[in-house]
C-alpha cells in the first residue's frame, strides 16, 4: 500500500520527522515534486545529515526515488550523495527518467526575475534554486529531462534549442549582458553539454534512472510498502495555494499521482496524512491572516513593522521552534494556527489522518490562539477564498485556548497521549474535530522518539 505525506500549510511542518517515524515499515520512499528548494535534517545513529534532494529514507537503507514530478539539479544530488558516501553511507537513490533537470541558467533566471520583481516589492521570496524557471520550461515543452542526459545526441539537440532562447531573454527582455553575469557559462551550450553529459554517464554507470511509475507499481505489486513524500505545503501549491506566492509544483495529494506515475486510485486506496505544525510559519512573501510577526527587513515581503505588540511573541516562538530556513537560513515569519487554511488543505488532499507537530514549542504560553474562521466583507468564512487578493483582506476571528505547561516531553512520548497536559489535549481535539480527521501522531520534540504515536498507517 501507499502512505502519502502532505504539508498542510506553507512548508516546514516537519514532514521529514513523520516520514522517518513511519519509515521502518517502508520499503521505498518516493518524492513526487519540488527539487533542492526543500530541506530536511535527518538524525541517524547519532549523526546529523542536512539534505535537500536525497530522500531521508535513503539514509536508513531504503530505496529513495525522485519521481517524474521532481526537478533535479544533478550538481546538488551528486554533492549530497558524495558527502554521504564520504561519511560511510551508500544511499540507493533512483531518479525518474521523466523528471526535469535544473540547468545552470535556471538558477540565474530565478535570481534575475526576483531582482526585477523586488523593484516593485513583488518578489516571491524564492529559494533561488531555479525551481520556477525549470517548471516553466517543462510546461513550455523546451525542458531537458533526466533521460535526455543519457543520450548525447538528444541532449545536444535540446540544449541547442533552449540555450539561445534563454540568452535572448536575458539580453532582449532583461536588457543584461550575459558575458557580464557572474556565471556566463550558464548560457554556453558546450559548457552545459560537457558537464551534464558527465552527469548522464554517472547516472548510467550507477544504474540510477528508472521509469518511476513502472518501478513503483512493480514494488507495490510485490507487496512492498511505498511512502510518497511531498515537499513544501498546500498553501504554496501552484494550483491550490496563494498564487503567485507559490512554488511551481503540486505538493497536494493529486501531485502524488501525477508526480510518480502511480494512478490516483492507488494513491487514494492508501492513507494520506496531512502534516500540521501547531502554529504557522512562512519563509516567503504573501499574506498570512494570523500573522504575529516577521523579522523586519530580514524576511522577504516583510519590510514594514508588523503588529508591534505581537513581535515579542513571534520572536519567542521562532527561537523556541528554531524557525530558520533549512536551505536559506532565513528567519521565518510566525503566526497562529489557521483553521480556514487547514479546512482547505484537508478538502484538497482528502487527509485520512493528520500529524500535529511542535506542540511542545507552544508550552509555557499563558494563552494560545487559533484563527477559527475569517471575516471577509462582513461575511464569515470557514475556508480560504480562492484569490490571494481576497485572502489578504480576510480578518482572522481568533479563538483562545488556555496554555499548557512545559513537561518532560520525552516521557510523554513514551507514556502516550494521556500523558499530555489537559489543555494541550483540548487543543489537539479541537483540531481533530474541526477537520473531522484523527491525529495519528503528535510531535512533542525534535528527536525521532519525541512523538506520540496513536496510529501506524501501514
Ligand atoms: P521556490 O520553490 O524556490 O520557487 O520558492 C517559491 C516559494 O515557495 C517561496 O515563497 C519559498 O520561500 C517557498 N518555498 C520553497 N521551498 C520551500 C520549503 O521547503 N519550505 C517552505 N517554503 C518553501
Image (spheres, rainbow, N blue to C red):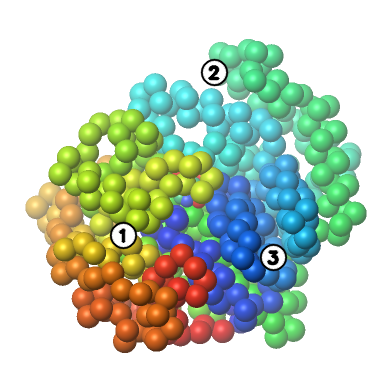
Q: Which residue is mark 2?
A: 174
Label 1 environment density (alpha carbons within 10 Å; few <14, some 14–19, many ≥20): many
Taking the image as shown, residue 337 lies to the left or right of residue 31, namely left
Q: Nearer the viewer, mark 2 or mark 3?
A: 3
- Per the rendering, the mark at residue 279 is 1
Q: On the rendered image, what quadrant is the C terminus found in?
A: bottom right
12, above or below 270, in the image: above
Q: Nearer the viewer, residue 262 or 351?
A: 351
Mark 1 lies on a secondary structure that is: loop
Label 2 environment density (alpha carbons within 10 Å; few <14, some 14–19, many ≥20): few
Query: How many numbered marks, from 0 up?
Result: 3
Q: Nearer the viewer, residue 152 or 332?
A: 332
Q: Nearer the viewer, mark 2 or mark 1?
A: 1
Q: Residue at x 58, y 39 (%)?
A: 129
Tag 2–tag 1 contact (CB < 8 Å): no
Q: Can residue 447 be seen at all in this image of the molecule? A: yes
Q: Which residue is mark 3?
A: 58
Q: What's the CA distance linking mark 2 and mark 3?
A: 41 Å
Q: Nearer the viewer, residue 277 or 205?
A: 277
Q: Residue at x 56, y 13 (%)?
A: 175
Residue 132 position within the rendered picture, expressed as x and y whole percent measured from the top left: 55, 40
Q: On the rendered image, what quadrant is the N terminus found in?
A: bottom right
Between discs 2 and 3, the one toward the N terminus: 3
Residue 281 position within the rendered picture, expressed as x and y whole percent measured from the top left: 36, 52
Q: Nearer the viewer, residue 130 or 213?
A: 130
Taking the image as shown, residue 337 lies to the left or right of residue 78, namely left
Q: What's the CA distance linking mark 2 and mark 1?
A: 40 Å
Q: Residue at x 34, y 67 (%)?
A: 360
* Label 2 within 8 A of ligand 1 by Cβ: no
- Per the rendering, the mark at residue 335 is none
Amino acid at each position: 500500500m501507499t502512505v502519502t505525506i502532505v504539508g498542510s500549510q506553507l512548508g516546514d511542518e516537519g514532514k521529514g520527522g513523520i516520514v522517518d517515524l513511519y519509515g521502518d515499515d517502508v520499503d521505498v520512499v518516493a518524492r513526487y515534486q519540488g527539487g533542492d528548494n526543500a530541506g530536511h535534517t535527518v538524525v541517524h545513529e547519532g549523526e546529523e545529515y542536512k539534505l535537500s534532494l536525497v530522500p531521508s529514507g535513503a539514509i536508513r537503507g531504503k530505496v529513495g526515488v525522485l519521481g517524474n514530478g521532481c526537478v533535479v539539479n544533478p550538481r546538488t544530488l551528486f554533492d549530497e550523495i558524495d558527502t554521504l558516501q564520504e561519511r560511510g553511507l551508500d544511499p540507493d537513490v533512483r531518479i525518474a527518467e521523466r523528471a526535469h533537470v535544473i540547468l545552470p541558467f535556471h538558477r540565474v533566471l530565478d535570481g534575475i526575475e526576483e531582482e526585477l520583481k523586488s523593484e516593485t516589492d513583488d518578489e516571491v521570496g524564492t529559494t533561488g534554486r531555479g525551481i520556477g524557471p525549470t517548471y516553466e520550461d517543462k510546461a513550455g515543452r523546451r525542458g531537458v529531462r533526466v533521460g535526455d542526459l543519457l543520450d548525447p545526441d538528444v541532449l545536444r539537440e535540446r540544449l541547442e534549442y533552449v540555450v539561445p532562447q534563454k540568452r535572448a531573454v536575458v539580453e532582449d527582455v532583461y536588457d543584461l549582458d550575459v558575458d557580464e553575469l557572474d556565471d556566463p557559462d550558464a548560457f554556453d551550450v558546450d559548457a552545459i553539454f560537457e558537464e551534464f553529459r558527465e552527469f548522464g554517464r554517472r547516472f548510467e554507470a550507477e544504474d540510477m534512472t528508472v521509469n518511476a511509475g513502472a518501478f513503483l507499481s512493480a514494488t507495490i505489486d510485490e507487496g512492498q510498502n511505498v511512502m510518497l513524500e511531498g515537499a513544501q505545503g498546500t498553501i504554496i501549491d501552484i494550483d491550490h495555494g496563494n498564487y503567485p506566492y507559490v512554488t511551481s509544483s503540486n505538493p497536494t495529494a493529486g501531485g502524488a499521482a501525477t508526480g510518480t506515475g502511480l494512478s490516483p486510485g492507488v494513491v487514494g486506496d492508501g492513507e494520506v496524512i496531512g502534516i500540521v505544525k501547531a502554529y504557522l510559519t512562512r519563509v516567503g512573501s504573501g499574506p498570512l491572516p494570523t500573522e504575529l510577526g516577521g523579522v523586519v527587513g530580514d524576511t522577504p515581503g516583510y519590510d514594514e513593522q508588523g503588529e508591534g505588540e505581537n513581535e515579542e511573541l513571534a520572536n519567542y516562538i521562532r527561537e523556541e521552534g528554531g524557525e530558520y530556513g533549512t536551505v536559506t537560513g532565513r528567519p521565518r515569519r510566525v503566526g497562529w494556527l489557521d483553521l480556514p487554511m487547514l479546512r482547505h488543505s484537508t478538502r484538497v488532499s482528502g487527509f485520512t489522518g493528520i500529524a500535529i507537530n511542535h506542540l511542545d514549542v507552544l508550552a509555557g504560553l499563558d494563552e494560545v490562539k487559533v484563527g477559527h474562521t475569517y471575516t471577509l466583507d462582513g461575511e464569515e468564512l470557514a475556508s480560504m477564498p480562492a484569490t490571494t487578493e481576497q485572502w489578504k483582506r480576510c480578518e482572522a476571528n481568533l479563538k483562545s485556548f488556555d496554555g499548557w505547561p512545559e513537561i518532560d516531553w520525552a516521557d510523554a512520548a513514551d507514556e502516550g497521549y494521556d500523558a499530555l497536559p489537559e489543555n494541550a489535549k483540548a487543543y489537539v481535539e479541537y483540531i481533530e474535530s474541526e477537520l473531522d480527521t484523527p491525529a495519528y501522531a503528535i510531535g512533542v520534540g525534535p528527536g525521532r522518539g519525541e512523538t506520540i504515536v496513536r496510529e501506524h498507517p501501514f
